[in-house]
Image (spheres, rainbow, N blue to C red):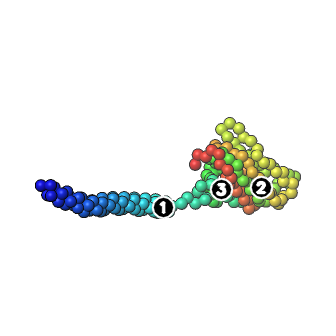
C-alpha cells in the first residue's frame, strides 16, 4: 500500500508539474487576450475621436465665412449736386453695410470711426465764404463734429479724422449758405466696436 501511495504521490507530483506549465500558459494566454482586447478598444476609441475631429473640421470649413465687409460696419458715399442752407445733403450709399436714411448715416455701433471727406465746393451766388459742416444728431441734440470754412469757390475740402460715435447717432452733412458740390467722397469705417446692435 505504501508503494502504491508513493507511486500515486509521484504520479500526482508529475501531473502537478505538468499541469503547472499548462495553467501558466493558459493564464498567460488569458492575459494576452485581455491586453489585445484593451489595445483594440483603445485603437477603436482613437479612430472614433479622429473621425469626430475630421467631421467637425469639415463642417466648420464648409460653412460660409462672413466677409470682412459684413463684419465691420462701413459706408462709402459719392455726391455731386446742390446743397441748400440748413438742410442736410441727401446722401445715398454707394457701397457698404451702414444704412443711410433721409440723407443721414445711421450709426449702429458705439466705437471709433475713421472718417474721410474729400470734394470741391462751388458757391452759387456772390458769397465770400461758405461753411461745410459734418454733424450728428441723437434723440435730443444736434452737435457739430467738424466744420470747414471755404473761402474760394472751387476750393477743395479734405478731412481725415477719427471720431467716437454712439449707436443711434445720425451723421449728416450740410452747407451754409447754398452751394454746388462736386465729386464729394465720404467714407466712414468702424475701427473698434464697443457696443454693436447690427
Residue 134 percent location from the top left of the image = 75, 49
Describe residue 198's horizontal placement relative to residue 23 as left or right: right
Task: Count residues near mark 2 (Cα–Cα under 10 Å), then give few for <14, some for 14-19, many for 20+.
Answer: few
Residue 57 is labelled as: 1
Label 3: which secondary element: strand
Question: Do the numbered discs 3 and 1 sit on residues whose CB atoms are within 8 Å?
Answer: no
Task: Count residues near mark 1 (Cα–Cα under 10 Å), then give few for <14, some for 14-19, many for 20+.
Answer: few
How far, Cα to Cα, is label 3 from label 1? 34 Å
Of the pair 135 and 180, the residue shown nearer to us: 135
Any part of residue 76 in sight: yes
How far, Cα to Cα, is label 1 from label 2? 42 Å
Question: Considering only order in the chain, which callout, 2 or 1, is on the residue closer to the N terminus?
Answer: 1
Q: Which residue is mark 3?
A: 75
Q: Residue at x 69, y 60 (%)?
A: 78
Of the pair 113 and 29, the residue shown nearer to us: 29
Residue 160 is labelled as: 2
Identity of the residue furthest to the left in this view = 1
For discs 1 and 2, the disc positioned in front in the rendered view? 1
Residue 112 percent location from the top left of the image = 70, 49
Label 1: which secondary element: helix
Question: Considering only order in the chain, which callout, 2 or 3, is on the residue closer to the N terminus?
Answer: 3
Any part of residue 170 in sight: no
Q: Residue at x 61, y 46 (%)?
A: 196
How far, Cα to Cα, is label 3 from label 2? 15 Å
Q: Residue at x 12, y 55 (%)?
A: 1
Question: Considering only order in the chain, which callout, 1 or 3, is on the residue closer to the N terminus?
Answer: 1
Residue 53 percent location from the top left of the image = 46, 60
Amino acid at each position: 500500500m505504501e508503494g502504491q501511495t508513493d507511486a500515486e504521490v509521484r504520479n500526482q507530483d508529475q501531473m502537478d508539474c505538468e499541469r503547472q506549465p499548462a495553467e501558466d500558459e493558459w493564464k498567460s494566454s488569458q492575459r494576452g487576450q485581455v491586453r489585445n482586447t484593451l489595445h483594440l478598444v483603445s485603437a477603436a476609441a482613437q479612430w472614433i475621436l479622429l473621425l469626430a475631429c475630421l467631421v467637425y473640421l469639415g463642417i466648420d470649413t464648409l460653412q460660409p465665412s462672413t466677409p470682412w465687409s459684413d463684419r465691420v460696419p462701413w459706408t462709402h458715399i459719392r455726391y455731386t449736386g446742390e446743397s441748400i442752407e440748413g438742410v442736410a445733403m441727401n446722401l445715398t450709399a454707394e457701397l457698404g453695410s451702414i444704412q443711410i436714411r433721409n440723407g443721414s448715416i445711421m450709426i449702429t455701433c458705439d466705437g471709433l470711426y475713421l472718417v474721410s471727406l474729400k470734394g470741391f465746393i462751388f458757391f452759387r451766388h456772390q458769397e465770400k465764404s461758405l461753411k461745410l459742416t459734418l454733424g450728428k444728431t441723437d434723440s435730443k441734440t444736434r452737435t457739430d463734429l467738424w466744420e470747414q470754412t471755404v473761402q474760394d469757390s472751387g476750393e477743395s475740402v479734405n478731412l481725415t479724422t477719427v471720431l467716437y460715435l454712439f449707436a443711434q447717432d445720425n451723421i449728416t452733412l450740410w452747407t451754409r449758405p447754398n452751394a454746388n458740390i462736386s465729386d464729394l467722397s465720404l467714407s466712414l469705417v468702424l475701427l473698434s466696436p464697443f457696443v454693436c446692435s447690427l
